[in-house]
């Protein structure tokens, strides 16, 4: 049995087809039941379908009414959500920069349910395209759809598909189409906590054109929001940051069992806020240094991409279980490299565990206080880094032995 785990032989072609298929069918049945038991866009528990998407839709209504700063006013935003979904509707706070208001306004032109379906279908399609580009295999789409973070994202109406596709798309395009890559990276500014390591990687890797394209995209987006919404919207966003920090991050208003970060793990285990910040800062600095090393030394493209995506979750204090969508492309990058160059002992087992972890991370944290999500992310990061550095040392030794010595 140990040898089977070591080699990953248990992950047969048939199992890699059947397990995701079973999960996809389960997701479809669960979502069908959710919609069948809903009434007036509300589920049986009294929450809007797509829960978190309700904040996006409400924000879009404000924009179309000419009040783009109102989503950052919690009282006004809560009132709008109750107007749309009833007096007992729960409140979902808006914490995104004004960039996301552009998309929210477009989506709010549709009826709520239609907007939710369009939002999820469009961004899911982008994610699947990116995954297919990473691993050109017939099994890729089924494994990508069966990835449990997909179900978490669908039930929350969240933006994990968009985040994963933008980051993966940028990494795929980086070497051959750097301007496109930079534009995709620039669009990630709608979720700034996921951009912490991008400048580190791009500058260390000397990807100057992509860096300039990302900066230009960010400037264009900022200018567009200033023209469309006015500077007062940016002021409102900045004024809302203390609430996001104190209530959502430090107090864990959404529940620390949902956090998939070092900060969240410390708070889940009862650690005080200062300790959580110290350990999170240590993690951020450490992974930033390692990412810089990988990209500076020209580590293999797929390995450094996987390391960057895993490190992104280790570098931010705030990421929830639906944000684990970016692990899908990270797993795919490592799998693609392994299929061509072989897998290290236990690497297939690790990839399988990371693939499964979004299904278990929240419940394990909630009922056993074990932050297995961030543990698996850290192990994936270590696996990508060790493979990149190890293979690079092997290449150096091969080169050294083939260079003829002088007499």
Image (cartoon, rainbow, N blue to C red):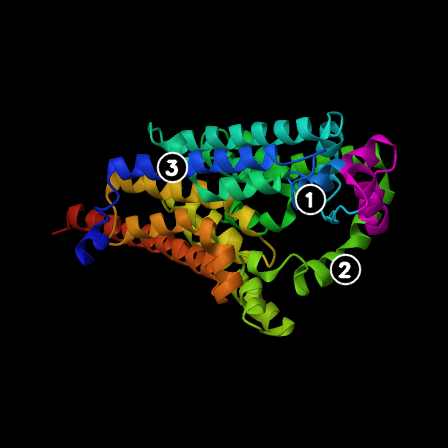
In the rendering, which numbered label is found on residue 65? Answer: none
Q: Residue at x 21, y 46 (%)?
A: 9
Q: Say which quarter of the image contains residue 87.
A: top right
Residue for badge 2: 242
Q: Main secondary structure of the magenta part?
A: helix
Crowd band around label 2 with a 10 angstrom C-alpha radius: few (<14), some (14–19), many (20+) = few
Q: Nearer the viewer, mark 3 or mark 2?
A: 3
Asked whether, in this view, residue 104 is left or right of residue 355, the answer is: right
* Quadrant of image for the N terminus: bottom left
Q: Nearer the viewer, mark 2 or mark 1?
A: 1
| The residue stretch that appears in magenta | 58-87
Asked whether, in this view, residue 144 is left or right of residue 247, the answer is: left
Q: Position of residue 139 (x, y in %)?
A: 34, 31
Given residues 175 and 135, the one toward you in this image is 135
Evaluate whether residue 209 shows in this view.
Answer: no
Q: Secondary structure at mark 2?
A: helix
Q: Secondary structure at mark 3?
A: helix
The span from disc 3 to disc 2 (Cα, nearest Å) is 43 Å
Residue for badge 1: 47
Asked whether, in this view, residue 144 is left or right of residue 283, the answer is: left
Please tell me which of labels 1 and 3 falls first in the chain. 3
Residue for badge 3: 22
Crowd band around label 1 with a 10 angstrom C-alpha radius: few (<14), some (14–19), many (20+) = some
In magenta stretch: residue 85: yes
């Amino acid at each position: 049995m140990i040898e089977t785990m070591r080699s990953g032989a248990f992950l047969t072609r048939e199992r890699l087809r059947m397990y995701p298929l079973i999960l996809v069918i389960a997701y479809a049945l669960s979502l069908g039941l959710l919609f069948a038991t809903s009434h007036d866009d509300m589920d049986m528990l009294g929450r809007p379908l797509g829960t978190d998407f309700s904040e996006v839709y409400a924000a879009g209504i404000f924009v179309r009414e000419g009040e783009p700063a109102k989503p950052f006013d919690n009282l006004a935003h809560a009132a709008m959500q109750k107007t749309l979904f009833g007096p007992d509707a729960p409140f979902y706070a808006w914490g995104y920069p004004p960039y996301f208001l552009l998309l929210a306004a477009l989506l709010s032109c549709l009826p709520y349910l239609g907007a939710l379906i369009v939002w999820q279908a469009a961004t899911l399609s982008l994610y699947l395209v990116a995954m297919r580009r990473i691993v050109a295999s017939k099994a890729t789409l089924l494994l990508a759809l069966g990835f449990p973070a997909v179900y978490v994202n669908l039930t929350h109406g969240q933006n994990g598909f968009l985040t994963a596709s933008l980051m993966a798309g940028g990494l795929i395009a980086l070497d051959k189409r750097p301007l496109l890559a930079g534009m995709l990276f620039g669009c990630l500014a709608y979720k700034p906590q996921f951009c912490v390591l991008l400048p580190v990687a791009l500058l260390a890797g000397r990807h100057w054109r992509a860096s300039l394209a990302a900066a230009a995209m960010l400037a264009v987006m900022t200018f567009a929001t200033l023209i469309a919404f006015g500077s007062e919207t940016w002021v409102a966003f900045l004024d809302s940051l203390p609430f996001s920090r104190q209530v959502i991050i430090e107090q864990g208003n959404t529940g620390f069992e949902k956090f998939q970060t070092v900060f969240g793990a410390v708070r889940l285990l009862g650690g005080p806020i200062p300790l959580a910040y110290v350990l999170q800062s240590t993690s951020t600095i450490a992974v930033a240094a390692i990412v810089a090393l990988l990209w500076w030394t020209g580590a293999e493209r797929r390995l450094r991409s996987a390391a960057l995506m895993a490190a992104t979750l280790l570098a931010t204090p705030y990421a929830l279980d639906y944000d684990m969508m970016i692990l899908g492309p990270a797993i795919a990058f490592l799998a693609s490299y392994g299929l061509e160059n072989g897998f290290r002992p236990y690497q297939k087992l690790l990839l399988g565990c990371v693939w499964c972890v979004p299904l278990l991370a929240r419940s394990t944290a909630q009922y056993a206080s074990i932050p297995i999500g961030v543990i698996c992310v850290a192990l994936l990061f270590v696996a990508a880094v060790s493979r990149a550095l190890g293979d690079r040392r092997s290449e150096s030794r091969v080169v050294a032995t083939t260079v003829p010595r002088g007499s």
